Image: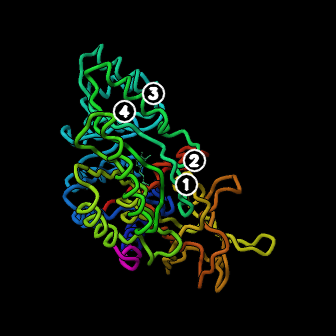
Amino acid sequence: MRMEAWAQAAKEWAGARRRLRRTSAETSEPVCAFVYDLQGLKKHVSDTVGRLPAYCRMYYAMKANSDARLLTVIRPGVHGFEAASIGEVRKAREVDPDVPVIFGGPGKTDEELQQALRLGVERIHVESLHELRRLCYFADTLGLDITILLRINLPIELPQATLQMGGRATQFGMQESELHEAAAILAGQNRVRMAGFHLHNISNQLDAEAHLKLMEQYITWSRHQRELFGLSKIIVNAGGGIGVNYRQLDRQFDWYRFTEGLQRLGREHAEGVQLDFECGRYLTAFCGVYVTEVLDIKRNYNKAFAILRGGTQHFRLPVSWKHNHPFEVVPVESWPFPFPRPGIEHEKVTLVGQLCTPKDVFATDEPVRRLQCGDLVLFVLAGAYGWTISHHDFLSHPHPDMVYY
Ligand SMILES: *Cc1c(COP(=O)(O)O)cnc(C)c1O
């Protein structure tokens, strides 16, 4: 949905919510909800995945948003789901018992590795030599076969990324220098089949050309390692990390240019390579908004604050990324009280939630034309890493409604 459509939908929904409030004493709750556009999601996933060349596949990284309603919509548009815990593997299977699931993440427990083998996941991404040894052991004792990718933390510098997962010291993957030992471990067993590499060095990449260069580096490096593992074909999982621009909404990652480049890369460099993506943010960020009501407006030490229903316990993304989250004011005409309505005009305002901590901030010193108590504030790009990453029960406020269009 476009911004105007979101605003309209939020207004209609808030109106319905208020009518309900008037007819029932119990529902005196102010507006506060995540609203998802399922049709928009379906179209975005299909447009995005539809542009990939034939040697590429798309998985959805469930951790961005594992809401079952969203998963059901995404499922037909992608090759499979990427799960980062056994909990996510189970959620995936509830949506579709046959969906291919790849299982990654650091710190897999013995129980998780055995469950993954029993549940027949498509692949496991192995993050360390110790994990590799344990997996070989369990595959052997359970008598179950499994395909794996080795997650390698490649020494590639990525200065422009918001979050760097590799190319420097992080907890992810193993080092290039451990490859020979990995090959030796794998040579001594026959249940675990190594099929390629998992390389997810970057998060929130906004530059399509830079990302293409990275893909080329991933592919070239992976092809060089084939001999060591006796592989003619190889899977390269390039992770997720396609970014969403929260600062300039009209300057998003150029997926068209990226996929054009992938076509070229496929012709020139990718013989014998299956290139997999596991995107989270880029697939679901656009389909959701967090909409909430202004409870109070006040001035403190010459700064204007708007206190909103809910808070970062619902929507932690702006705090975790330390940014001002983009929003739109949806004016509401009605005012129920006989006394004046607090408001500001042509002023900068800091938008906060109800939590008793000064860190409960969505945006600082943002100019607004007009904002009044009872208006709605609509935070866009809230479909990924919103509700899912938040500490829901801090202060025991009610959870937001979940609304699906
Ligand atoms: C988080 C994560 C993803 C998804 O990343 P996005 O930035 O949401 O696309 C994919 N793969 C791995 C291993 C991850 O940790």
**Which of pointers 1 and 2 lies earlier in the amino acid sequence?**
2
Is residue 21 among the parts visible in the rendering?
A: no
Out of 355 and 338, give the one closest to the viewer. 355
Q: Residue at x 50, y 81 (%)?
A: 333
Measured along the vertical axis of the image, is residue 287 above or below residue 8?
Answer: above
Q: Which residue is mark 1?
A: 316
Check the picture and name the quadrant holding the C terminus: bottom left
Q: Which residue is mark 4?
A: 86
Q: Position of residue 19 (x, y in %)?
A: 40, 68
**Which of pointers 3 and 2 lies earlier in the amino acid sequence?**
3
Residues marked 3 and 1 touching at CB (< 8 Å) = no
Range covered by the magenta-colored residues: 1-8
Amino acid carrying label 1: it is Arg
**Which of pointers 2 and 4 lies earlier in the amino acid sequence?**
4
Find numbered disc 1 in the image and state the secondary structure of the residue it sits on. Answer: loop
Q: Residue at x 25, y 46 (%)?
A: 80
Q: Which residue is mark 2?
A: 168
Find numbered disc 4 in the image and state the secondary structure of the residue it sits on. Answer: helix
Residues marked 3 and 4 touching at CB (< 8 Å) = no
Residues marked 4 and 1 touching at CB (< 8 Å) = no
Amino acid carrying label 4: it is Ile
Please say whether residue 347 is one of the residues in the magenta stretch.
no
Q: Position of residue 318 (x, y in %)?
A: 57, 60
Find numbered disc 3 in the image and state the secondary structure of the residue it sits on. Answer: helix
Q: Which residue is mark 3?
A: 129
**Which of pointers 3 and 1 lies earlier in the amino acid sequence?**
3
Find numbered disc 2 in the image and state the secondary structure of the residue it sits on. Answer: loop
**Which of pointers 3 and 4 lies earlier in the amino acid sequence?**
4
